[in-house]
Image (tube, helix red, strand yellow):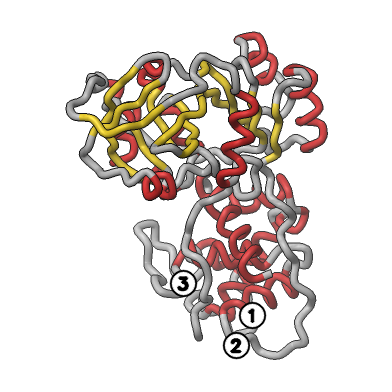
Amino acid sequence: MPALRGPSLRGTALRGTALRGRAACAAFVIVIAGTSAASHVVTPGAGSGVAPAAAGQARAATAFRQIILPDLLVVAPDGLTSGQLASLRRIRDVRSMIAFDGAQMTAAGHPASVIGVSPARFRSWVPLRTASDQAVWRTLSRGGFVAAPAAARSLRLRGGHDYQLTGTSTQRVPFGASAALGVAGVDLVVSTATSRKLGLVRRVAALISAPGASMPALTARARAILGPAAKIVSLRARQLPVASVPSGQLPGSYLELFKASAARYCPGLSWTVLAAIGQIESGDGANVGPSTAGALGPMQFLPSTWQAWGTTGFGLPGPPDIMNPYDAVPSAARMLCADGAAAGGTGLAAAIFAYNHATWYVREVLALARQYAADYA
């Protein structure tokens, strides 16, 4: 069966935010203009003026535990106060939140935005591929900076070289790695310690994860706390597409199989979710196991789970075959549906979590599903 030709696993769950491209940088300038860190320059330098972080900090920064899917970005022109942060955390359904420093800089004559983060905490908020890249987190924990791929190219950054960053003070900071950061429009990332030395606006923005909240209610509560001057951006993607009921013809590709399985075995479930799970679990049948846990087939079922959910979907007559995608994909749709996937929203997230008990997995499935929706819908 031909494999689904689709995008690689990019993890860009924040597509569609207001921080997109150079226009987004301009929007970021508006909310932080007039601060003490509004003018920065990046120039090549020799030698590093930033001391490496302590070994304990480095270990903490490279300890990866989970992936968190953000729902809301808030930006305050003068920085978020401790009281505002505490009030945001108390909003009903808010599960996680991270605040970070930020400011606009000029690099080689071009505007660029920089944020200062706690590496150990920020790691959970980036795409899985970046979270898994040890070079990124070693760089930040040792006082260096990381660049988004587009910024690294436009600034012609070279690994192992030091660059002079000038804010309220000047620091020579080593460039260590480029990586997707998850929020488009952010060009450079430094650690909080380096941010303090550069004079970035403290706690200028925050990401909020509140998967159980309605977006209008969440936005209204945040606005009541922050006031009219704050910028508030929804990071939730548009609704995933749902396929119509197929004509009954045997699917001839994985793409058709995902669409037919969702329509027949879980009306209301987007086929893009099945496509994302199939890609993440086995590369659409390229690696059918057994996994270290004993999972098998293109959708990586444990034999015990297959006993409960295995379905002779579009496959050959007889017992369901865990290795046959014509049975495995419909079985996955059936299992997801039983766990509430057709309801969308938090029901979909809970069903994906039930499929694989990891929050990073939920984020990666939804991120890739959105990319399939953009490319194929």
Secondary structure beneath dot 2 equals: loop
**Badge 2: residue crowd in 10 Å (few <14, some 14–19, many ≥20):** few
Q: Where is residue 59 shown, x and y percent of the image?
A: 28, 28
**Separation of marks 3 and 2 at Cα, in angstroms:** 18 Å
Find out whether the residues at labels 1 and 2 contact each other: C-beta distance under 8 Å: yes
Q: Residues within 10 Å of mark 1 (few under 14, many from 20)?
A: some
Which element is circle 1 on? helix
Residue pictured at 45% horizontal, 32% vertical: 106
Tag 1: amino acid: Glu
* Left or right: 275 as drawn, with respect to 56: right
Residue that extends furthest to the front in the rendered view of this protein: 109
Name the residue type under label 2: Gly
> Which residue position holds label 3?
297
**Element on which disc 3 rests:** loop
Q: CA distance from mark 3 to mark 1?
A: 18 Å
Question: What amino acid type is highlighted by mark number 3?
Answer: Gly
* Residue at the disc numbered 1: 256
Pointers 3 and 1 in contact (C-beta within 8 Å): no
